[in-house]
Image: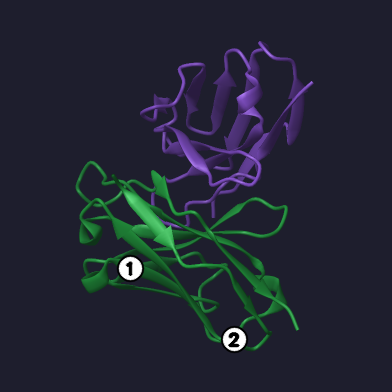
Amino acid sequence: EVQLVQSGAEVKKPGESLKISCKGSGYSFTSYWIGWVRQMPGKGLEWMGIIYPGDSDTRYSPSFQGQVTISADKSISTAYLQWSSLKASDTAMYYCARLPLGVYGDYSGYFDYWGQGTLVTVSS
Amino acid sequence: DIQMTQSPSSLSASVGDRVTITCRASQGISNYLAWYQQKPGKVPKLLIYAASTLQSGVPSRFSGSGSGTDFTLTISSLQPEDVATYYCQKYNSAPPFTFGPGTKVDIK
């Protein structure tokens, strides 16, 4: 069974750093791209970026480039999303999700399996 | 970047009604479109990919159609458990694979 298990809720102050995680199981973690999606309170889904754990190839949305860092440790089947200096506007639910394989073995850009979400609250 | 719009932004319908949600891309995206359902307080769930392919386990009352710039998600007979927000997502060409703004579906 494919599972993506995310780390628990976080409460941080503005300016602090944070790294949240997403552990994959039940499939070959290094063969599938993993993405991150933001959902601010009461708002819609925002595509942040994706990473290929096999070689850490990463693609970002222009809206999030430079604001967050996506990484992965294939030895422990875990992807990460991190901030170096949080802002109140980073308060949101963050989901990781898997991209299925594409016809040519790369990826199809939609998400077939999702993590349970990590709620990040940034408040002074 | 290609922009995605959805209409209506919300709707209220009776149990058993046929419900149609529209998603429009600002440029042609062939059939590279997915639909997701997000129930209140829950994780998004993939319903349809490639514009019209039903994800395994999704009830057959859900269907998708369209190609190019105009797409529809249809619920043939609305059920109480279908109360949710529905999002389209384009995934043609290169990232970012933008989501639409969502359509909230309620029971009248």
Local secondary structure at mark 1: strand
Image mark count:
2
Query: Which residue bears the numbered disc 2?
Result: A85
**The N terminus of chain B lies in quadrant:** bottom right
Colour scheme shown? by chain
In the current view of this chain or complex, which residue is farthest to the bottom?
A15
- Between B78 and A100, the residue placed more toward the observer is B78
Q: Which amino acid does label 2 sit on?
A: Ser
Instruction: Read off the chain for label 2.
Output: A
Residue B46 drawn at (x, y percent): 46, 38
Residue B83 drawn at (x, y percent): 66, 30
B17 displayed left or right of B31: right
Tell me what hue chain A is rendered in: green
Give the CA distance from mark 1 to mark 2: 22 Å
Query: Which residue bears the numbered disc 1?
Result: A78
Same subunit: marks 1 and 2: yes
Q: Which amino acid does label 1 sit on?
A: Thr
* Chain displayed in purple: B
Q: Residue at x 60, y 44 (%)?
A: B100
Q: Is residue B63 visible?
A: yes
Q: Choose top left, top right, bottom left or bottom right for residue A70.
A: bottom left
Q: Can residue A111 be seen in this view?
A: no
